[in-house]
Amino acid sequence: MPTLYLSPHPDDFRNLRILIAAQYGGSGSGDVKIVEAAAAGAACATKLPQLETESDGTLTGTGAIAYFLASDQLRGSSAKEVTLVQQWVNFADNEAIQAACGWAFPVLGVMKANKQALERAQQELKKLLQVLDDYLKLRTYLVGERITLADIAVSCSLLLPYKYVLEPALRKSYVNVNRWFLTCVNQPQFRKVLGEVKLCENVEQAASKPVITQEQQAASGPAAPEEGEPKQKTAAQVKKEAKKKEKLEKFQQKQDKMKQQKQPQNEKKPKAEKKEKKELGVITYEIPTPPGDKKDVFCPMPDSYSPQYVEAAWYPWWEKQGFFKPEFGPPPTNCFRKEVLTLMMIPPPSRFLNETLRRRHRMRGEMTLWNPGCDHAGIATQVVVEKKLWREQRKTRHDLGRDGFIQQVWNWKNEKGDRIYHQLRKLGSSLDWDRACFTMDSKLSYAVQEAFVRLHEDGVIYRSTRLVNWSCTLNSAISDIEAQVDKKELTGRTLLPVPGYAEKVEFGVLVSFAYKIEGSGIFCADEEVVVATTRIETMLGDTAVAVHPEDARYQHLKGKNIVHPFCARKMPVVFDDFVDMSFGTEPEGAVKITPAHDHNDYEVGLRHGLEFVNIIDDNGVLINVPVPFLVRTPCFTGVCVRDGGSWVFESSSSGVQRGGSRSKDIVEPLMKPQWYVRCDEMARQAADTVRSGELRIIPEFHHKTWFNWLDNIRDWCVSRQLWWGHRVPAYFVTVNDPSVPPGEDTDGKYWISGRSEEEARMKATKVFGVSPEKISLRQDEDVLDTWFSSAIFPFSIFGWPNETEDLKVFYPGTLLETGHDILFFWVARMVMFGLKLMGQLPFKEVYLHAVVRDAHGRKMSKSLGNVIDPLDVISGITLEGLHLQLQDSNLDPAETERAKQGQKSDYPNGIPECGTDALRFALCAYTCQGRDINLDVNRILGYRHFCNKLWNATKFAIRGLGEDFRPESSAQLCGQESLVDRWILSRLCHAVQLCDAGFRSYDFPAITTAVYNFWLYELCDIYLECLKPVFAGMDESTIRAARSTLYTCLDVGLRLLSPLMPFVSEELFQRLPRRSADTPPSISVTPYPDTAEYCWRDEQVDRNVEFTMSIIRTIRSLRADYNLTKTKADCYLKCLDEETAAVVTCYCAYIQTLSSSLSVTALVEGEPPAGCAVAIASDKCTVNIMLKVGANISLSRYSIL
């Protein structure tokens, strides 16, 4: 066992960093022996921390030991991440620790206070915290989307400041660092080492000096000598110190006097706090506006962006105006068929990308329909209502009866089921609500009934007794391939919770036992075959033992039988290729066969004509077994097998344990009569449509999965033993005539489908050749799988099987956008049923987006407490509010407590108000084709700040345009545009091109990046700053051209933004003047910018401005380094040649404005005057800034001429 030697001090950040890394790496105290310095001995006392490995190797140094003990994930999952992690670790070791200790140690009394050194450490730490704060603005962690060694190293280096010196007033400036630091220290691994970290409230000088090791002091640099420490000094030293003390006293008196003079100014500082508070505060729209009326946009704009103000009143107006209807616009004629017809649907729950695509299509003038719909979620809904019924009334569904229970479900649906529609409205989803439908509505229920009857009549749907996945808690079949079955990987003996058990149940143990060969032990020695299983109780249902045909060890057993020790059942030894000759224990290669309770064994049983013995009933209880085992105990607790069977041994075994995700119980394979859909021919046609290019799946790497599933498809079990859902429209026929033998439930010939009982009776009369009065019918109690009704959704919502006008117009559609996780369950089945029942594909393109996970990459689960309600992100919610939501859920107390801890870890301060537009923009920015995305609320908050930037920029621009400004009827150049006007129009055209390409390729991050960069870095940071001296000048022609250019940028920029951020773009668009009286009333129906119209790209101007910006950035950097931020200085630009000088000369005015220079001079031959600070901007230009006398400068990085 490795031995770790540590210093005994509780605040030694080196110890804490190592111990936290060990927690993540799985090396807890049980894996590493920890020894404090007192027991370490003199040999290692000066080298702490130190790790002695089992191979007698020794590691010293915090970084090396933490790296050794950490898991691979902590080190980075790619070469790029590994490099970034190391850079941040170096940042902690070389910069953060020194500054943190330099500030904290004097306060704690560890070292003598040196005022200059303390102030220097404070400034350095504040500077580092600001760097961190900027970096973390749009990030959850320092590297990637999870904790790494970088987070551990940097957070541990900041522990002392956060605990002892960073008061609330100081912390306020570093919101993002605070959020990141609290997220880190509240992780379970951190808390196990640190306990609860209490942040500093008041800085108090330590009363007594804590014990700090020499190494810890060395980490922060040499410590000052302690007071009272005996040391002989020379006379010269004493005299020197006296003079130094006298100077320090005078300096201190001067500083105190300056502070007194500045005191009144300091007292006014709370105004800055007020400004910050105002920016993040809530502003509401108070003007009375009846629902559906247009919002007042003539009132003054609030000082800052507020989601509640901006999002008020717009959605009801959009709805009332009919903007969301495909019929909006010119009167419909036959020519609309020439336009792209876009059909997007729910269920499953709405996707943000649907909305973005739909809005853009509508703005392009294409007839677009987004039809809202919701499925009935058979299993999930029934489970929720049954739990609610038991919790509130202590009743089961059987107590109410089928009709009473279904009424309870409808009551719950009417109460809770519209929440998703409320969310969609809040999210600004432009759905045609007049077409909203629910799969249990009469229109869709009729379509489900019709589809079943037609498919049954065609022989596509049939009844058969087969092995199904059975949920003993639900008493229903569930599907193995769907999300209703969880497969848990077991690496060995594992205890798992199972419904109905107080204690956890053991799984993952491989039990080996022996079957005797028939006839052995009479005239020859006993012979036996050893088999192994993790389900020992299933041996009571064994009907054979299988071996591989090529296994030489068992060739002599051909034609022989084995004897079951309890059931007196002779079982053949069969030879089958599916057997793994290395499975089991010595001698391996023999496998027990239980055809009625294992999917692989079921196939073997069919191939060899074996007996199917059912030993498990619907509740998971043993049946059809010898008397000693007829106990009312669920079968997976195991049975005692001793007499007649030879125990060999038990061992841990890796494998898969399957359980129901809804019911949390164990899924049992059972033989049951069920309804099946024959899929082979439909699957072949669906696969061929992709192979031929008739159906396009984006991204294309999903093709392999599509073909693999469809080419190896099994028939689909569509019946469920539930009460909530579409009841199977099939009837079991009993014929009251002696000439017709009675049928059995498992015989499909005695089942007749019908749209009504009367129709089924007439069909039965023809099938059995008897009169109607001799026919008795019993409708099947089962319901259909929810996905069955969802599979016909593309045409059932338009009135199929009736030939409605909507069906003619809107089927087939163009595009389906959905998550890749339901490619089989929904997309493939819609394609198959569309081809079968309609003869056409339901859509031409399928875009598969990423699945949203939490910030740590975990699947969102209520039991983990990481489910993010979009409404909570939009409006904000406290941590206490999140906890209250858990109380209304169906989680048991243990799960509720675990979920609360998850919420506390992920959202220690609750969820801030982000607004709808920020949430929509963030999800589009996150989305990569076909990959999971980790949703971080803090990044969404960053996009709320982007909304505030849009707000302030537009507000400034409107003032610059003036009240009398009237734009031209169309966007065009007047010929008097300045260089910066031409540049911003070029960048605008480039943004239009990038957005167009992004939408065509479904590259949503490219779209958001193009819009974000244009607004923030090009329009706001450069162009608007360049306009300030223009608007303050007297050149009317230049001002007119600038105003026209500015209006074009606002108009086009907001239209680019509209599909992503509909509320803020509408609010700002409505406040701009119109080009003409017939302009569309809303930005949502205003033409989307087209590359053919906006074609002013000038790449030469782009290159020149980029070169100019490199000069400006260099000047800004020099000014900051020499503390010239409040002083303008002369700037001399030494150019390599005349061509470079000509470019610089053209842009001198912009360089002067954006760099806050006193003057800018381009030089080729001449030299800049003496006394300049110098920095290289590029290989063609060197920046020289004249330093003023008396400037407080640092000469550490740049040379001075």
Image (cartoon, grey):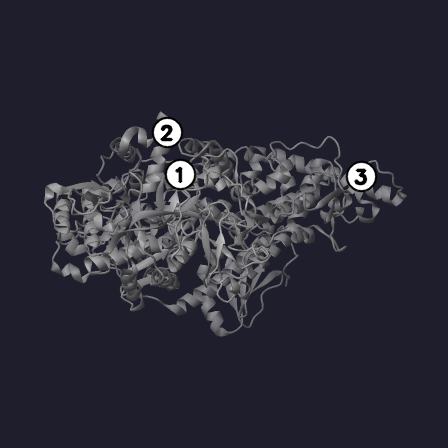
Marking on residue 15: none
Front label number (3 vs 2): 2
Q: Which residue has dot 1 on it?
A: 619
- On residue 390, which mark appears? 2
Q: For mark 3, what is the residue?
A: 226
> Which sits earlier in the primary sequence, circle 3 or circle 2?
3
Residue 799: x and y in percent read 16, 49
Q: Nearer the viewer, mark 2 or mark 1?
A: 1
Residue 563 at x, y = what percent?
Answer: 49, 51
The CA distance from mark 3 to mark 2 is: 71 Å
Residue kind at label 2, given as amino acid type? Trp
| Side of 362 relative to 518 (left or right) | left
Alpha carbons under labels 2 and 1: distance apart? 19 Å
Packing grade of label 1 (10 A; few <14, some 14-19, many >=20) is: some
Q: Secondary structure at mark 2?
A: helix
Earlier-in-chain disc, 1 versus 3: 3
* Label 3 CA crowd tier, 10 Å (few <14, some 14–19, many 20+): few
Residue at the spot x=46%, y=70% of the render? 1142
Q: Image point 77% across, 55% down: which residue?
A: 56
- Seen at 36% across and 37% down, the residue is 383
Image point (62%, 39%), residue name: 192
Q: Are marks 2 and 1 in contact (CB under 8 Å)?
A: no
Label 1 element class: loop
Measure the alpha-carbon separation of dots 1 and 3. Answer: 77 Å
Q: Is residue 379 left or right of residue 837?
A: right
Task: Give the left or right position of residue 792, taking residue 888 as reference.
Answer: left
Q: Earlier in the sequence, mark 2 or mark 1?
A: 2
**Tally of marks:** 3
**Label 2 crowd bin: few (<14), some (14–19), many (20+), radius 10 Å:** few
